[in-house]
Image (cartoon, helix red, strand yellow):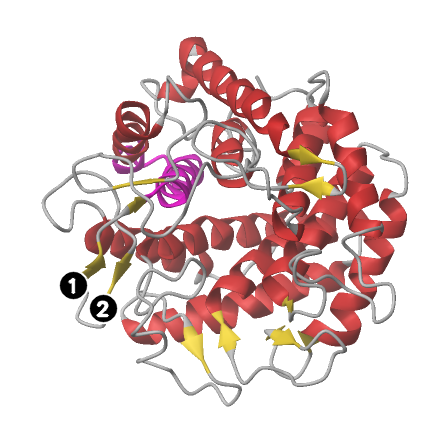
Amino acid sequence: MTDLLSPFLLPETSWLRHSAHRSWLEAQGRRLLDFSKAAKMPDGFGPLDDEGRLSPDATPDSTITARMVHAYALAALQGVPGARPMVEHGVQALLGPLRDTEHGGWTAGPSDPRGRKQAYLQAFVALAASSAVLIGAKDARELLKEAIAITNDHFWSEEEGVMRESFAFDWSDEENYRGANSNMHSTEMCLALADVTRDRTWLNRALRIVTRFVHENAGSHGFTMPEHFDRHWNLLRDYHRDQPTHALRPFGMTPGHFVEWSHLTLKVEAALLRATGEAPGWLLPDAQALFETGIETGWAADGKPGMLYTIDWERRPVVDRRAHWVQAEAATAAINLLKRTGHGRYEKWYRTIWDYIDNTLIDREGGSWFNEVGPDGTPSEEIYAGKADLYHAYQSTIAPVLPLSPSLGTAVLETGAPF
């Protein structure tokens, strides 16, 4: 039940020591898996409305498809019936109708076949491929080979140690932008690829990304996480000031990303210790500092419970919606810090966050979780419409019972069903 690198650090009173809590997590995960099966379409997976239905004009979405492949692969590794066919359906979609057969790579979906190719999506395709390989899904290795080639040929900047952001569909017109969000998810991608391919290059890349964004950028901004830069690494303070509720690149800073970077930084440390027995000494304190600023600036910053969406440069609330993924990542960060340190403060936050999720976000009538709510807990759609895909919520139900390293899919494979 405890982390392989710190097997005795969970307090005796920790929720994770109780079978009832582990059973509760398992039940929530199964509920999310069942609800999300309705997102399946002939050519991939699409977004669901509040009632868990595809709209009549829904089209497959490449990001949703990739994230569903990853999530159902985790379920298949646990022996959940019905999960493997979902993975194989998604793999065929990513190799077929969702893939650009002329130029390679992936755009947002068939509704935007000549759209931009984004590092954010690329990270999820590679993550999905790595997870699908772990269950031996048909053609998963072909998808993984393609995803790695696209990452190496177009997105990875060896000079900068980060991912380039986006290109036109034909790989021209590189965007004058470097983003924290896409590189955060690319860190997760790199950790998974390191485990599945056994190629240490990916672990080195994960460390380089975290060094740039966490140790250097966040470290020089009081362990807040600036999100937006140009290609010369000039901070774009006014970026999307006119789009504060942008779903991927909102104005200001996102406390949910502070805590998400926090637990990814812990996972990089754990992966390095597992692989080499050594890791930079700053990884743990930086992860702790990011969690603290995330909680300080995001949790109940307007006097209401829950962690809000964005803050400005003076750390004042900008968008007060409580996105489901923010709470999920905060819970994961709290439990990973508890496993790493044994400090009771993190147990307290783990319980507080899950209490909020249970009482406010879990939709016991419509299913799944509300994608976002207002400060008073009323469902809203200022940032996100409909119900979210599996990725954030489902991972938050299995991460607590797995070690920090290896990455989630490999951890399930090596340890067996986690519950």
Q: Which residue is mark 2?
A: 312
The residue located at (28%, 59%) in the rendering is 310
State left or right for residue 11 relative to residue 214. left
x, y percent for residue 38: 61, 27
Asked if the stretch drawn in magenta spans residue 185, the answer is no
The region drawn magenta spans 323-347
- Label 1 to label 2: alpha-carbon separation: 5 Å
x, y percent for residue 207: 58, 64
Q: In the image, what residue type sits under mark 2? A: Asp
Q: Which residue is mark 1?
A: 316
x, y percent for residue 52: 50, 28
The residue located at (73%, 61%) in the rendering is 106
Q: Quadrant of residue 47?
A: top right
The residue located at (83%, 71%) in the rendering is 103
x, y percent for residue 183: 55, 65
Verify CB contact (< 8 Å) between mark 1 and mark 2: yes
In depth, the one of 364 and 213 nearer the eye is: 364
Kindly state the secondary structure of the residue where label 1 is placed: loop
Figure check: 103 above or below 71: below
**Quadrant (top left, top right, bottom left, bottom right) of the C terminus:** top right
Magenta span main SS:
helix
Farthest-out residue, top: 20
Kindly state the secondary structure of the residue where label 2 is placed: loop
Residue 191 seen anywhere in this rendered image of the structure: no
Label 1: how many residues lie within 10 Å, few (<14), some (14-19) or many (20+)? some
